[in-house]
Amino acid sequence: MIMTQQHQELQRTVRNFVEQELNPHVDEWEAAGGFPIKAIFKQLGNLGLLGISKPEPLGGMGLDFSYETVFLEALGATHCGGIPLSISVQTAMATPALAHFAHRELQEEFLTAAIRGDAVASIAVSEPGAGSDVSAIATTATSDGDDYLVSGSKMWITNATQADFFCTLVNTGGDKAHSNKSLVVIPAKLPGVRVGNKLQKMGMRASETAPVFFDQVRIPKRYRIGDEGAGFLLQMLQFQEERLAGAALTMMGLENCVTSTIDYVRDRQAFGAPLLNNQSIHFALAEMQTEVECLRALTYRAVAAYCRGEDVTTLASMAKLKSGRLTRSIPDQCLQFWGGMGYMEETQINRAYRDLRLTAIGGGADEVMLGIICKLMGILPSRKKS
């Protein structure tokens, strides 16, 4: 992935936005358990940052995903994980299928508003009994003439409390788990849509997450994205951008863990010398930074291949797996070097330890990524038929 002057200008724009509009307010928003999402999204929309890789006729920039990656990586320098997560749901999780597979009328009704920052999008796939196992969802959309009647529930839905529409995976008929699903858009204000109470989470506290319930919600079939029965495939394709986004979002957060820890252990004295002087500490920090650069190189390689139109399921899964592993190990190691101060909630390392832990779970757990990689390597044992 070659960094051009245009990439660098975008990077500067996002860094300035993070430093001026987000970081000064993070502590306040974390304490409140939410941030002014509609106001922030409108600011991002005005800067064109919610449609970087979306089609120009719909208000996007029409750039390739490498620019989206630069945006997400720079956004990861925010002093919490919840706000970048909410923004990435808008750009890389709830709208890629709309941009790639929906008909123009549906795009103009929903995607254009999301790109402008006039509508908040949310992705509604996970359910209480179907997290990483997407094929097990139970929400149904029953045909009724030119409409569907949607019933079911979704769980752990980011942006749910503020969402204007949900990109939702539903069952539309048949008993084959991989061909009985469709992606549909469900406006949040329709009768029968109910958003539950905001969930209290270990981390990502500035993002609002809640369950969503659908009770015989009537939507026109024109709100379907792509063909009926193609939803599982379209969601798997949408996962490619989501997983690349997940890896990109973590890189600056991990780097900040390392640099803030270096500053702390350089100043912190123990037994008459800076903690940084201990070989076990400075060697560990050097290895952590090396790991971050390996993740960056892998992610950039995957993004470059994606921009060439290649199937990057293996590389995206590897990048997601590696980011999940590092977001568990690096904040943990760094917090150990902070000692008792790292155990205090007021420190950034404490917040990173809580926030980044989600990476190994959301968008497909580490174990699911390993299963995908093994399958594509041809080393996954076949299941015996009963």
Image: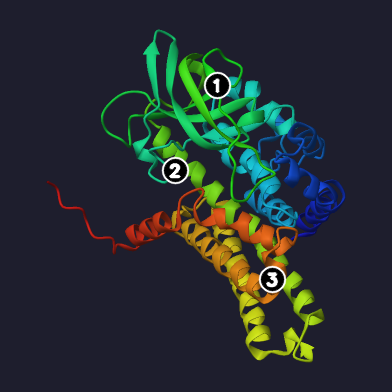
Quickly name the residue at label 1: 194
Alpha carbons under labels 2 and 1: distance apart: 27 Å
Residue 255: tell me if it is visible: no
Q: Amino acid at mark 3?
A: Gly
Expressed as whole percent of the image width and height from the top left, the position of residue 375 reads: 33, 58
- The residue where tag 3 is placed is 340
Q: Secondary structure at mark 1?
A: strand
In the rendering, at what x and y percent does residue 3 appear? 72, 62
Mark 2 and mark 3 in contact? Answer it, CB < 8 Å. Answer: no
Instruction: Give the vertical position of 147 relative to 73 (above or below).
Output: above
- Judged left or right of residue 179, residue 67 is right
In percent of the image, x 61 and y 73: which residue is there? 333
Q: Secondary structure at mark 3?
A: helix
Q: Which residue occupies 59% across, 69% down? A: 332
Q: Quadrant of the N terminus?
A: bottom right
Q: Which mark is residue 236?
A: 2
- CB atoms at circles 3 and 1 under 8 Å apart? no
The three-letter code of the residue at mark 2 reads Met
Label 3, label 1: how far apart the Cα atoms are: 43 Å
Q: Earlier in the sequence, mark 2 or mark 3?
A: 2
Instruction: Name the element at disc 2.
Output: helix
